[in-house]
Amino acid sequence: MLKNPKETVVLLVEDDVFLAGIYQKKFEMEGFKIFVSNNGEKGLADAKKKKPDIILLDILLPKMDGFAVLEALKKDPEVKNIPVILLTNLGQKDDVERGIEQGAADYLIKIHFKPSEVVDKVRSVLKLKK
């Protein structure tokens, strides 16, 4: 059953302050609760602390890259079932395959998706989640 967006918590791990602000505004306008972490280490810590419903994860991050964060999340029994969507500008086939192999629910290339489409993607991934 689809949760009410008001109760849905999104964790965005994104070091680009401008971009994070755009996504944050869009998700809030759509009624989601959103937290932003500006580096990989903080993103991993916030995921464990806040237990969001879904994580949007950049790959090129300071302190710990997105692949390392994803790997750590998937190894941790407390957070391994939280869906992770990689949201990045790395569009190489190898990167996409690596992300999916590591357990990402989806792989979105930032320049190909408007914030509203990212919100729609989050909705569709969460609809599948029980």
Image (cartoon, rainbow, N blue to C red):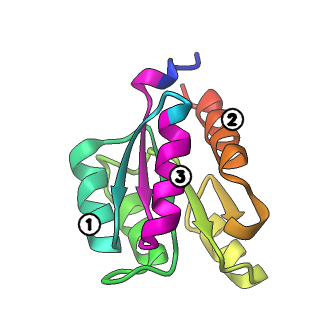
How far apart are the alpha carbons under marks 3 and 1?
Answer: 18 Å
User: Which residues fall within the magenta stretch?
Assistant: 6-28
Mark nearer the N terminus (1 vs 2)? 1
Above or below, comparing residue 48 to residue 40 in the picture: above
Mark nearer the N terminus (3 vs 2)? 3
Q: Mark 1 — residue?
A: 42
Residue 41 screen position, x and y as percent: 27, 72
Q: Mark 3 — residue?
A: 23
How far apart are the alpha carbons under marks 1 and 2?
Answer: 26 Å
Mark 1 lies on a secondary structure that is helix
How far apart are the alpha carbons under marks 3 and 2?
Answer: 17 Å
Quarter of the image where one finds residue 108: bottom right
- Which mark lies nearer to you, 3 or 1? 3
Q: Residues within 10 Å of mark 3 (few under 14, many from 20)?
A: many
Q: Amino acid at mark 2?
A: Ser
Quarter of the image where one finds residue 45: bottom left
Residue drawn at the location 49% of the way across and 75% of the way down: 67
Q: Main secondary structure of the magenta part?
A: helix
Quadrant the C terminus occupies: top right
Quadrant the N terminus occupies: top right
Q: Are marks 3 and 2 in contact (CB under 8 Å)?
A: no
Q: Residues within 10 Å of mark 2 (few under 14, many from 20)?
A: few
Q: Amino acid at mark 1?
A: Lys
Q: Mark 2 — residue?
A: 124
